[in-house]
Image (cartoon, coloured by chain):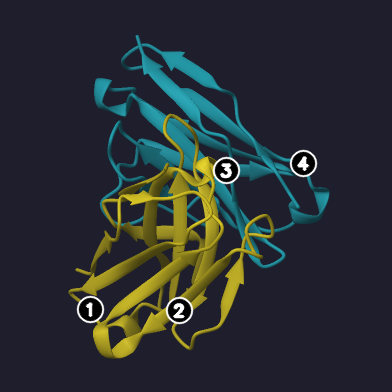
Chain colours: A cyan, B yellow
Amino acid sequence: QSALTQPASVSGSPGQSITISCTETNSDVGNYNVVSWYQQHPDKAPQLIIFAVDKRPSGVSSRFSGSKSGNTASLTISGLQAEDEADYYCSSYASGHVVFGGGTKLTVL
Amino acid sequence: QVQLQESGPGLVKPSGTLSLTCAVSGGSVSSTQWLSWVRQPPGKGLEWIGEIYHSGSTNYNPSLKSRVTMSIDKSRSHFSLKVISVTAADTAIYYCARVYCSSANCYLEAFDAWGQGTMVTVSS
């Protein structure tokens, strides 16, 4: 079973850009463009912000962007705002099941 | 705009069965092609439990497969989750979440609508 590894925490100042990585440890899934990203504020359900590596659902700010190179997907948030402070999770799908990354806590300084 | 709402007992005894339903409103159960269940232990990350297609076919997390059953009741517009032989490790917020489907494709790792979640505690 594949696993997705994210940094436990990242931080940035308002206006800056940050990137959160999501590395798949099973090389078999590296060829699949099936990575999504979620934002979760405390005591709230997760919200989809990126799907299929780099696509944004309707209504999601263009400050959020996704990319993938080999086995590592990345979420970039540009022009950091205080409201971006939240937990972020990546997810992928392979071999008939979904896997989530462990989550990254973003702190806006 | 489809809305999802989980419901069920908030407290389950160890070795008992956890039973939850996910009600769909603002759209038919049949229009929700794939639905997943996801859980989140207090203070921890997300864990995918499994998914069910509107035809009734299922895929489960290998680590939970022996204890999980998902079903769909189209007449009542709801999905159901059962987890047997629960332990304290099953204590979590349980979410139902709709898989995002465009006109051309379903993205099985992308959940575009979530319920608000329901807390289930396993304790005697």
B121 vs A33, left or right, is: left
Q: Amino acid under label 2?
A: Ser
Q: Amino acid under label 4?
A: Thr
- The image shows residue A51 at horizontal and vertical percentages of 48, 54
Q: Chain of mark 1?
A: B
Residue A58: quarter of image: bottom left
Assign the C terminus of chain B to one quadrant of the image.
Answer: top left
Tags 2 and 3 touching, CB below 8 Å: no
| Lower position in the chain sequence, tag 3 or tag 4 | 4
Callouts 2 and 4 in the same chain: no
Q: Residue at x 63, y 44 (%)?
A: A68
Q: Which residue is mark 3?
A: A67
Q: Amino acid under label 1?
A: Gly
Q: Which mark is residue A25?
A: 4
Residue A85: quarter of image: top left
Up the image or down, A41 lies above or below B91; here it is: above
Gap between marks 3 and 4 measured at Cα: 17 Å
Residue A83: quarter of image: top left
Residue sitting at the far right: A27
Disc 1 residue crowd, few under 14, some 14–19, many 20+, Cα 10 Å: few
Gap between marks 2 and 4 measured at Cα: 32 Å
Q: Which residue is mark 2?
A: B71
- The image shows residue B108 at horizontal and vertical percentages of 53, 66
Q: Which residue is mark 1?
A: B27
Disc 4 secondary structure class: loop
Gap between marks 3 and 1 measured at Cα: 32 Å
Disc 3 secondary structure class: strand
